[in-house]
Image (cartoon, grey):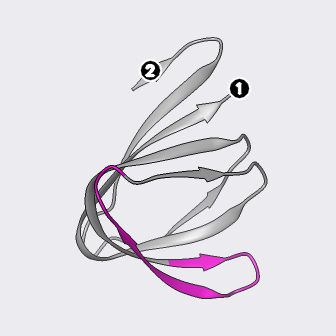
C-alpha cells in the first residue's frame, strides 16, 4: 500500500476457503482491523486460538512472531504497518 524509509504498509484480506497462510514477522508490526471476521490462528508451538477481529481494533506484533492464520467467517481485513 505504502512504503517509505520508516514504514511499509500491507493490506491483508482473508478469503473463505483459502488455505492457511504462514506468516513470519521480520519486523515489529501494528495491525489495524478495517473489517471484522474470525480467524483460526496457530502459533509456533501449535497452540490454536480463534480470534474475532472487530473494526478499529489495533494490535502490536513483535518481530520474530511466527503464526499460521486461516479464515473462519466474515470478511476480515487488516492494514499492517511494518516498522523499519
Report helix, strand or loop for mark 1: loop
| Looking at the image, residue 82 lies above or below residue 49 | above
Q: Which residue is mark 1?
A: 84
Q: Which residue was labeled with disc 2?
A: 2
17 left or right, relative to 44: left
As drawn, which residue projects farthest toward the left? 74
Query: Residue 14 location, x and y as percent?
Result: 33, 61
Locate residue 2 relative to residue 64 in the image: left or right.
Answer: left
Q: Position of residue 53 (x, y in %)?
A: 36, 66
Q: What is the crowding at mark 2: few (fewer than 14 residues within 10 Å), some, or many (at least 20)?
A: few
Residue at image x 53%, y 84%? 49
Quadrant location of the N terminus in the rendered image: top left
Q: Residue at x 64, y 17 (%)?
A: 6
**Residue 19 visible (yes or no):** no
Q: Residue at x 70, y 26 (%)?
A: 84
| The stretch drawn in magenta includes residue 10 | no
Residue 36: tell me if it is visible.
Answer: yes
Magenta residue span = 41-56
Q: Would you call the spot at circle 1 few (<14 residues within 10 Å), some (14-19), or many (20 or more)?
A: few
User: Image height check: is 29 above or below 45?
Assistant: above
- Which element type, helix, strand or loop, lies under badge 2? strand
Q: Earlier in the sequence, mark 1 or mark 2?
A: 2
Amino acid at each position: 500500500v505504502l512504503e517509505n524509509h520508516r514504514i511499509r504498509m500491507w493490506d491483508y484480506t482473508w478469503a473463505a476457503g483459502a488455505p492457511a497462510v504462514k506468516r513470519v514477522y521480520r519486523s515489529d508490526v501494528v495491525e489495524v482491523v478495517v473489517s471484522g471476521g474470525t480467524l483460526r490462528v496457530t502459533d509456533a508451538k501449535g497452540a490454536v486460538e480463534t480470534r474475532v477481529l472487530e473494526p478499529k481494533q489495533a494490535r502490536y506484533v513483535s518481530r520474530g512472531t511466527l503464526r499460521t492464520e486461516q479464515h473462519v467467517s466474515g470478511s476480515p481485513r487488516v492494514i499492517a504497518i511494518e516498522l523499519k
